[in-house]
Amino acid sequence: MFLILVINSIITIGISELYATDNAQTPTKPDSTSKFIAAPWASASTDEGIAVGFTAGISKFPNLLAYTSLQTSSKGYSSISLQAEIRNCYVKNILNASASKAIRQLYDPFKPIPEPYASAVVNRYQIRYSRLYQRSKNFAIGPDFKFDFSSARKIECLENTELPWDFEWPYPKRRFDRGTSYSAGLRARYATMNPNRPLNGRIVDLSFRIGQAEDRDWKLDLDRSGEILIALARQFSHRNRFYLRFLGQFQELIPPPIQNHLGGESTLRGEPSQRDYGNTILCGRAQYHLTVLKNWDFPLNLAHRIWSIFPVWAMDVEVVSFYDIGEVVDGHWGERSDRYVKTKQGYGGGLRFVIPPELVLYFDVAKSPHGSPRFYLGVGETL
């Protein structure tokens, strides 16, 4: 696993530096420098297996950042995504679009041990666009648009499993069936730190939308949805940092295929990916970072000795401990209506390899009270 981290960092940094250097137009003016960045990468997790991918993008600080990624994994997950932030004077345009295919499983939310009893191959398409107007240095507000579509095939019950008493066979089909939603509303964001590398500051991101949702047999004229993200990072010293995060996602009437999910790396580590789902999810995260090594250059120095094309950049090594907690509310689907699914939690630790200013390679191991350990390895900050 450490070898994957080292290889990933060497390839990413080396090729990124090559493309960035070759495409820099005005090196003496950092704010107007255009850079093209491209690199292959690798990641791994219990849910997706070993994944390989390629990312390419362009940046022109502080007005443009756009990149697209392709990936495929050993457990049948594949995706393509596009992320872009384009700033023009006091307006920031934020676009996130993705298309993915994955094998998803259905769990009994009331059993403490996660045992899947149905599975399907799920195709998911999501687009979100926000146009935020800067009202002050740290506050922006503007319209928000979202589209979500999901469909599935190869829906089947797994062998040697017992169906929950009120989950008859049509239930898995309805869970994995086709669903669509499109909505528009308002988004407001207050941020005093970079969300890609939150070191010391606060982020409050609120959105509310009104739209329409439907599945194969059902259609709603008016649906309301929204998100709340509150994050706090405190750097007590040059070696100690603490993160807190609360995430709430709300939907009123939404078909099961596109309901909010809980479980996995982005919401609750230690639980299977998308174990629980419902109209509303509430989840929190606490994470402590301790820097144990600073300016450590051994991996990249070794790579430079082997092939001088790679730059010698020092990295910091952090030891991380964390605790995740979450709950799902499903008020409209299934015979257990207006239910609160039992609170789930996960805890564990990991390592961060930080290459200044913002490249983070991570390795986490997490466990829920009744499940087996799960691991996550990749690039980026997990807050």
Image (cartoon, rainbow, N blue to C red):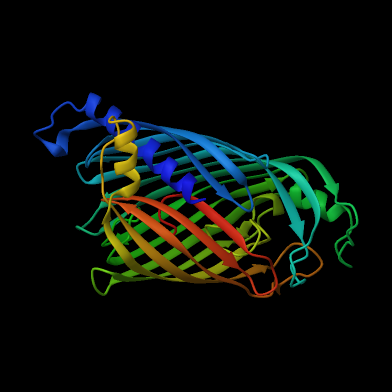
Task: Left or right? Give the position of 172 relative to 327.
Answer: right
Residue 38 percent across, percent down from the top left: 37, 31
Name the foreground residue: 13 vs 86: 13
Task: Left or right? Give the position of 124 relative to 333.
Answer: left
Q: Residue placed at 14% from the left, 38% from the top?
A: 30
Where residue 374 sits, quadrant-wise, is bottom right
* Quadrant occupied by the C terminus: bottom left
How many tags in the picture? 0
Asked whether residue 12 is in view, the answer is yes
Residue 55 percent across, percent down from the top left: 43, 34
Task: Left or right? Give the position of 158 relative to 62.
Answer: right
> Where is 370 relative to 300, above or below?
below
Asked whether residue 177 is in view, the answer is no
> Where is 39 relative to 143, above or below?
above
Name the foreground residue: 294 vs 237: 294
Name the foreground residue: 367 vs 333: 367
Where residue 240 sits, quadrant-wise, is bottom left
Name the foreground residue: 50 vs 167: 50
Q: Residue placed at 54% from the left, 55% from the top?
A: 376
Residue 233 percent across, percent down from the top left: 33, 68
> Where is 58 relative to 380, above or below?
above
> Where is 372 relative to 218, above or below?
below
Where residue 73 sits, quadrant-wise, is top right
Q: Residue placed at 34% from the left, 33% from the top?
A: 306
Residue 144 percent across, percent down from the top left: 43, 49
